[in-house]
Image (cartoon, coloured by chain):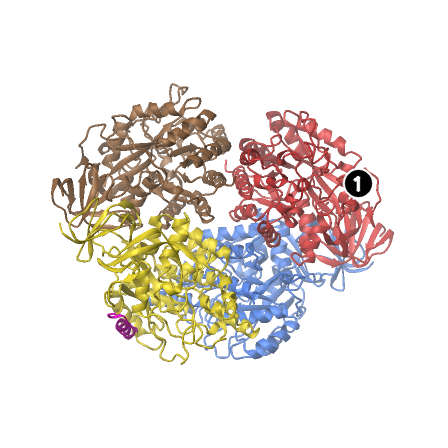
Chain colours: A yellow, B brown, C blue, D red
Amino acid sequence: MRFDTIIHGGTIVTAADVVRADVGIRNGRIVTIADRLTGGDVAIDAGGRFVLPGGVDAHCHLDQPEPPDAPADAPVMADDFRSGSASAAFGGTTTLMSFCVQHKGGSLTAAVDDYHRRADDQSVIDYGFHLILTDPTPQVLGQELPALIRRGHTSLKLYMTYESLRLTDTQLLDVFEVARAEKAIVLVHAENHELLVWITERLEAQGRTAPYAHALSRPSPLESEATHRAVTLVEIAGVPMVVVHISGGEPLEEVRRARARGVTVFAETCPHYLTLTAEALSAPGMLGAKCICSPPLRDDNAQAGLWRGIEDGTVDVFNSDHAPYRFDGQGKLSAGANAPFSKIANGMPGLETRMPILFSEGVVKGRIDLSRFVALTASNNAKLYGLHPRKGTIAVGADADLALWDPEKRVVIRNQSLHSNCDYTPYEGMEVQGWPQTVMSRGVVVVQDGELKVAPGHGRFLEQGPSSAWGSGDRIKSWV
Amino acid sequence: MRFDTIIHGGTIVTAADVVRADVGIRNGRIVTIADRLTGGDVAIDAGGRFVLPGGVDAHCHLDQPEPPDAPADAPVMADDFRSGSASAAFGGTTTLMSFCVQHKGGSLTAAVDDYHRRADDQSVIDYGFHLILTDPTPQVLGQELPALIRRGHTSLKLYMTYESLRLTDTQLLDVFEVARAEKAIVLVHAENHELLVWITERLEAQGRTAPYAHALSRPSPLESEATHRAVTLVEIAGVPMVVVHISGGEPLEEVRRARARGVTVFAETCPHYLTLTAEALSAPGMLGAKCICSPPLRDDNAQAGLWRGIEDGTVDVFNSDHAPYRFDGQGKLSAGANAPFSKIANGMPGLETRMPILFSEGVVKGRIDLSRFVALTASNNAKLYGLHPRKGTIAVGADADLALWDPEKRVVIRNQSLHSNCDYTPYEGMEVQGWPQTVMSRGVVVVQDGELKVAPGHGRFLEQGPSSAWGSGDRIKSWV
Amino acid sequence: MRFDTIIHGGTIVTAADVVRADVGIRNGRIVTIADRLTGGDVAIDAGGRFVLPGGVDAHCHLDQPEPPDAPADAPVMADDFRSGSASAAFGGTTTLMSFCVQHKGGSLTAAVDDYHRRADDQSVIDYGFHLILTDPTPQVLGQELPALIRRGHTSLKLYMTYESLRLTDTQLLDVFEVARAEKAIVLVHAENHELLVWITERLEAQGRTAPYAHALSRPSPLESEATHRAVTLVEIAGVPMVVVHISGGEPLEEVRRARARGVTVFAETCPHYLTLTAEALSAPGMLGAKCICSPPLRDDNAQAGLWRGIEDGTVDVFNSDHAPYRFDGQGKLSAGANAPFSKIANGMPGLETRMPILFSEGVVKGRIDLSRFVALTASNNAKLYGLHPRKGTIAVGADADLALWDPEKRVVIRNQSLHSNCDYTPYEGMEVQGWPQTVMSRGVVVVQDGELKVAPGHGRFLEQGPSSAWGSGDRIKSWV
Amino acid sequence: MRFDTIIHGGTIVTAADVVRADVGIRNGRIVTIADRLTGGDVAIDAGGRFVLPGGVDAHCHLDQPEPPDAPADAPVMADDFRSGSASAAFGGTTTLMSFCVQHKGGSLTAAVDDYHRRADDQSVIDYGFHLILTDPTPQVLGQELPALIRRGHTSLKLYMTYESLRLTDTQLLDVFEVARAEKAIVLVHAENHELLVWITERLEAQGRTAPYAHALSRPSPLESEATHRAVTLVEIAGVPMVVVHISGGEPLEEVRRARARGVTVFAETCPHYLTLTAEALSAPGMLGAKCICSPPLRDDNAQAGLWRGIEDGTVDVFNSDHAPYRFDGQGKLSAGANAPFSKIANGMPGLETRMPILFSEGVVKGRIDLSRFVALTASNNAKLYGLHPRKGTIAVGADADLALWDPEKRVVIRNQSLHSNCDYTPYEGMEVQGWPQTVMSRGVVVVQDGELKVAPGHGRFLEQGPSSAWGSGDRIKSWV
């Protein structure tokens, strides 16, 4: 048997197992896993490192266009597919899912076509698109969306907040109905929009516009409310849902309650909610703007509650919510050097640091084991978003997307060493243990020893299959 | 590369993945998994069937001796390792864990030695022993137990009820302390003994002694109570626990609450609790005695609650609690043909039907997917009881313990077709879909097409490593 | 000492005490409670009956005008203040609070003025008005509402559903802000409007329009959702809330959770939710229309959950939600003899039967004691709505509003014996034990032995003081 | 009409009402409440103060004998009925319930007789005895207990901890069965004895014996456990229970859960749990011993949880758990000046400060209103323990036990100003607002302006009737 590449001397980790074995790759796929392999055109010595499935980061924003009617000073995302995918790869991620956004009044299909053009020949790793519906017209619901789902966009992101993105409950239900018919899965950003606008107006009237006030404007009950509401809507409509970027133990408890009564709901959280708190928003001057994101950073209690959810299995997927805006007049400060918090772009970079942070805080600190790490960072994403078993695991037939992970390597995070176009990282100065040494995509080395080894365009678009959440039967009931 | 055996044409299922691949076996171990293998001395055609990890049934009672001072009419278990292991194998199980019981006043080490003698050269599949401590003397706690844990008995079963078995809270804590020091895991039978005895006395005084009254004697709050208490004890002592044979949604809720606040607790349930109710106890005459077990069978609500726990991830392991007593004067009726329920041996057979029932009711009915089936019936048990990755998965380096599973095969369960020495099955007449066609242990075919292919003694004793529950760090805290 | 009236020989019940004592009345008020009184111009012998505070029914709809733009076939309420108040009095109620509704586009003050005209000189018992805000314009919020609150309308009813009545979350918050500033209390009808419309459209598309489908169109999770959402809104805004007409144990659980975390929320339920189920909607033909109300009648489980809330103190107030529509072309069938459920007026009569039903099902059946009965039917309403201690109790200084209650009297409820203008009662044929013999308002006998003794206009408008919910301090925090 | 005494010019507070009225007293009972009274032999001017029902402190330990076999250095209670009752009266309490303890091996009846002798002619206020059963022999259960319940001891205190007092679960159930048959109510001290002993042994082995370690030895989960267990036992046996001296929000949550599922359980807490934390135990040297009590003082979170229970209605009764041991060799330090925490008598004084502390922290700070204050400190105790309406309220027919309460009076608590024989108060230096000016018992002034006005023996023994918890029907079910 001949292989294009073999990887020997590593310890393979999957969501199920940790075993000492070699990997044989042919035509970009894993074709053999064996106790000892020879015969590769190329042989890579893992040197005792872990051989992990390359990460699947199913929540990142890259080159996301502003609406046509956006103001001239709208912030610009720092990363396109080229820089974003490279940054991901350097951190061990080999599949990314970003968001293709329909603009209100616009066609969803056209948005997909446009987004393809933005991604074509740019990415160094494979990628898929979640669809963001913002205007569920009959045309979109009746024709475009079903066609697009069948073309492999089986996951739909829906917003309960942001003026330009949000759907009403009725619109959510309308989309859920199509999702049910076509067996798509929905991702929901759950915050009560009216409530946060109302609080924001009052804070602004009180002159409380500094970055820290952002956290006050969207308190935890507001996220719990929207989570509980979204749970009710999917329960009635009969569709599986991922509640994205859960920020603390309180909204997570709503997921736990929902599951215990039989609703099919999944929970995502992100690195910043596990490691930072709202204190970061009160850095001097406008520096807190770097850590403005929604839902906002919370407190120690919220964080402890999230970690318990990581440990007890309530949290299913761990993604970056990479939303890169430079700390300058094109990014965070596009509305001015002293803009009120409500005018500051939401989000922070995180594609590259996602896996090292969870490895260091989770695995090294003994909170989770290696298999749970792989499940959270790769396998569960691949399953929920219809990419499994091609992505997210190390198995015969899977794409040879691998990270040779050095569990001992200590890295002090410095933005200058990262590969995003963003000009800061919220983790500046944080030391982590564990970093990928070599990263492969479909059998090709993408990153090795800190160098990018492929040209833009190596990465390909991924058609998604149906989400594992649907199962084989008709377990998920609709109430209508 | 040469293999002793290759299995081709199957679909391999693990707790993480479902992939089309062949398996290469050498010296009883899986050495290669590949898209296509040739070169085996023996080639087995899976014919499109599922290739599952052989089941791990971590809760069965075989040839368990009565205490020396047991009454002459004490019931006798119908299965020894020979018949029990064969029955297991016919149902797809390739590893069993039975219970080695210390008798009060006796040595634990001696009990282990005796139990080895009972098992030696009898079993057709591999086996391990949980240790049942009933008399935690200083000698046992200080010397015997640590030595035995180090000899590979890393799981301890403890009873909160049964006069001859039960420990007080203090004794539980004393054992937990040793378990913590030695990194063992504890299994707890959780029912409030004093409460059930008290109710039983009153039922008997009222003349309510028929089998159905057994269910009344141990109502659900009593199991919830003991579960909650056991959770508190392990929380304080800092030791991981499996609550065994949880009978319904109410006690399961105590596990869910415990986890959500950070206690390391696992949940087991059994086939009968998912498929039968207390109505089975009101069969005519004494027939209900067949279904007497503890905790008792409950009602539809309890069952629905358990299924939600199967679906939402709260239930971790699914075992038979095989406790075979014939429906005759040596078994269920050893105290007389009209014995009161309190004199009837507890338990029912189930080793052989365990996996088919969960496959049929769970996978075929769309409640769970294949990977969750494997996790519940094999992988999680192997992990929790220190047998992973040797057992419970299909991975390079693992023992070649496999079940070639026919997902279409329909079987009407009849005791005459089963292989336990027990003379009845509680599932008589129940139709299931899915049954293993071929079962292998360490690369050797044990069962094929309904025939046993190995002699007693093929199965070997398994030393357990530490439970995965302990993790790598010091996540589990003691309060003292 | 001279009294206008004395009542002797009765057992006085308050929310705190049950004592054998006489009551002395002067100028319509209770001036003396003593072990033995003489010297009244009139002496009434209670004959061993209970002397209860006359009931306060704080949730009834009387002569409520349709909006100016209502369709010609809009249903007409069967009761005005004259018939409604009489019906109330015959059932032991001496204070009613009905709803003064602002129409969208209209003035709230004008609505109040109009409603006063409807009530003036009509009622036989005292009455107050909750204000229903449907159009919280700056004019209404900034001027009308504060002025009206100061004029004694300290309770505001707000709808989350019904097209012509409902407020958005933002509007709710805006009203809450004024309520906080002026120390008013809010009553919220909690159902998710968008969800119920969405389900209704689908049921109608499926041809499921018979009365029973009404229950399907507004399932329990939808009520729990709105309750949870309303709780969040008042928590943030810092205002006390009564969740009205809670239909089952599930939404009630949201109230329980809210209180346990410190939110000031109160729970109301109604006779029909404690005694009827959705089965009533499947009566032959259109008869089920009689029992259409929102939230809809539920099932036995929901009912059992409500009773537990009555018993454990979670339910605070018990009101009729009297909404009388005749079963004819002016009422329930105004949209046609076969109108779909969505066109059938919501509500059912209940003013007269409210107290007898709770006495019979609650006190006689041993679920609650006499003081709790008084608290639920009178005192708690008076306190929450700023009428205490003038109304809702028997105490010196209180209005002499009394019901001499015969606890042994058995009555088979027949609409022909009731005094509402409605042509049916949902309790036709139900036997209750306990009925008032004599009912007094401000010392005047209003009803005696089944005869009305006063002319319309005896009843007077009540200015409300601040709700007891606000307490004396600043316990209720706003988050902004 | 002539009165022995009239109280004019006050505002009467009951659990239901707050009204301006005068009180007329004859033969020690309230015979008239009226807007204006004249004609008393004695007229007391309340001067605008509140006229409260004298407090009922249903949990205090006075002159409680040690067991016959107690060690010579057993601690001695500082207060007998004489000093204890005086101290109570100075703080506004006019009824106390102390504990008559059966010693193991001894007769309960004899204990009652002895305890009567200790109380006879000593108390300045009326008193009742809860019975502490420690040895439920057939003689006690079958004869003594039923007879004593019928003699007016309708409340039974049972311990789950303390070697000399505690009952096993079986013994608890046996007592509950008699309590059910005779309609008594049980009070349970809920801590898991075996667990606390086990922790204590380990702390002592580690040399952690200073007072602060007491709090570590009985952590909150241990109290939650016992509470949950006790709830289960009373649920099965069918008897109402008061969980006494709940120390924080966690065990209180078990009460809330129990009620929500229909179990008849009541909650008591005490002043120290609402105002002190375990920090008090780390005072220099042995000073922390003053605040050793069981359950122990907790932390801010626990305290906040209790306050929420005070506010949301979960806490029913508020008592002192007065257990006075001097800080000397006869009291706290009886086992030596450096005794380990486990040898230090549990408890602290509190009879006199109970009502001022709840008034100041609860009413003045706006957490509760006056009626809730009266309910917690007087009425609910009287009802639960069968003393209502004779005690615990201001109503015609009730004993004229009254406290004229000055809501403005500010007092800095100093032990030298208190009237217990104990030589310290845990509240030394704490300022409270609100203190009784005049206290009356059966129409006689007991305390006025800081002086005791009656001789020992004014107080009389109270026979209790059945607890209100039983209700009128058969609502409380037994499972057997």
D107 above or below A382? above
In this view, the residue in front, D236 or B142, is B142
Amino acid under label 1? Val
Q: Where's residue C313, x and y in %?
A: 58, 52
* Image quarter hosting the N terminus of chain C: bottom right
Quadrant of res D108: top right
C143 above or below B109? below
D422 above or below B323? below
- Chain that bears disc 1: D
Q: Main secondary structure of the magenta part?
A: helix
Instruction: Residue C427: tell me if it is visible.
Output: no
Q: In this view, does C63 lie to the left or right of B400?
A: right
Q: In this view, does B84 lie to the left or right of B339?
A: left
User: Most extreme residue toward the right, as rendered?
Assistant: D41
Q: Where's residue A390, x and y in %?
A: 24, 57
Instruction: Residue D134: tell me if it is visible.
Output: yes
Disc 1 designates what residue? D124
Question: Which residue range is magenta in the image?
Answer: A108-121
**Residue A115: within the magenta?**
yes
Quadrant of res A377: bottom left
Q: Is mark 1 on a helix, strand or loop?
A: loop
